Image (tube, grey):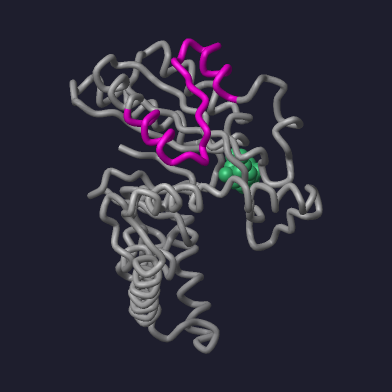
Amino acid sequence: MTLFSPREPGVLLWRGFTLQEFANQCFGNKADYGKGRQMPIHYGSNKLNYFTVASTIATQIPHAVGAAYSLKMDKKDACAVTYFGDGGTSEGDFHAAMNFAAVTESPVIFICRNNGWAISTPTSDQFRSDGIAVRGQAYGVRSIRVDGNDALAMYSAVHSARHMAVNEHRPILIEAVTYRVGHHSTSDDSTKYRPANEIEWWRMARDPVTRFRKWIEINGWWGSEAESQLRSSIRSQLLHAIQIAERAEKPPVNDLFTDVYDNIPSNLREQEKLLKETINRHPKDYPADVPI
Ligand SMILES: Cc1ncc(C[n+]2csc(CCOP(=O)(O)OP(=O)(O)O)c2C)c(N)n1
């Protein structure tokens, strides 16, 4: 069971989520498992044990502990894993989750991406502890700090953490030290709050993809030809998936009101009626292919 923030689509891809499934979610079409009710990049998959991404920072952390505790009670040989940023550790949810995990000895791996920033707030304005790993230790959770830009170091740490979580029934915290070279989002200009040469240094000297590529090239497992072939193949698969997702029918309007209450309350019924009347009154303002 995996509980995410929106920065880990790679894990989902690795588990077998198809490019078409990614595109369906981003376009909120009828094939989207969330029925078009989530913002783009909020993926989820029952089949792949992947809890739907939530934008509300850190809410996934106590959920992961709950899922792990349930795996332990059911005597499953499995663990839960959850991802969050340094900003997530400034939320109460992080602290409640750490304590609950430690006391219940739940098999959960906490992976914190300490990228130095919560949008424009640097870690120095968030906390005065020496990073995140010490916070786990303070709660009695075995914790390790790893170079998050070293793929092999991360693989090795997560591999061992999983072994410990599943076999020893204990929580583990991994602090992956990294840097967010991009802006937080398309509405952010990070050069307003940090020096451009700092961003450039991390981009040029510490880039984890360049580092990993160098390692596989040195070992003769990869080269520029293989890379350009892969890039062009993925690009055309992606464009194809986007075209299909774009053309697909949207979910019916009724889906906006289902799946929360067993019996839909009268105020929601009223909103549903109002929405349908509005759509009927202004048909040109709403897509014609959305079933009402
Ligand atoms: C509860 C809550 N408060 C505030 C926000 C607005 N917000 C969105 S992302 C973000 C920063 C998150 O920083 P971090 O957890 O370090 O993750 P990063 O984006 O750096 O990976 C904030 C404050 C939110 N989504 N949820």
- Residue at the image point whose x is 31% and y is 48% from the top: 262
Q: Quadrant of ligand 1?
A: top right
For the record, the magenta segment spans 132-159
* Image quarter hosting the N terminus: top left
- Residue at the image point whose x is 66% and y is 55% from the top: 183
Is 270 situated left or right of 43 in this image? right
21 up-or-down from 1: above or below: below
Image x and y of residue 287, in percent: 46, 83
Image x and y of residue 76, in percent: 19, 25
38 up-or-down from 154: above or below: below
Is 136 situated left or right of 185 in this image? left
- Residue at the image point whose x is 49% and y is 79% from the top: 279
52 up-or-down from 284: above or below: above
* Residue 253 showing in the rendered view: no
Image x and y of residue 98, in percent: 48, 20
Q: Does 165 appear in magenta? A: no
Q: Does 140 appear in magenta? A: yes
* Image quarter hosting the C terminus: bottom left
Is 268 situated left or right of 87 in this image? left
Quadrant in the rendering for residue 102: top left
Query: Which one is nearer the viewer's eye here, 207 or 280?
Result: 207
Image x and y of residue 259, in percent: 34, 53
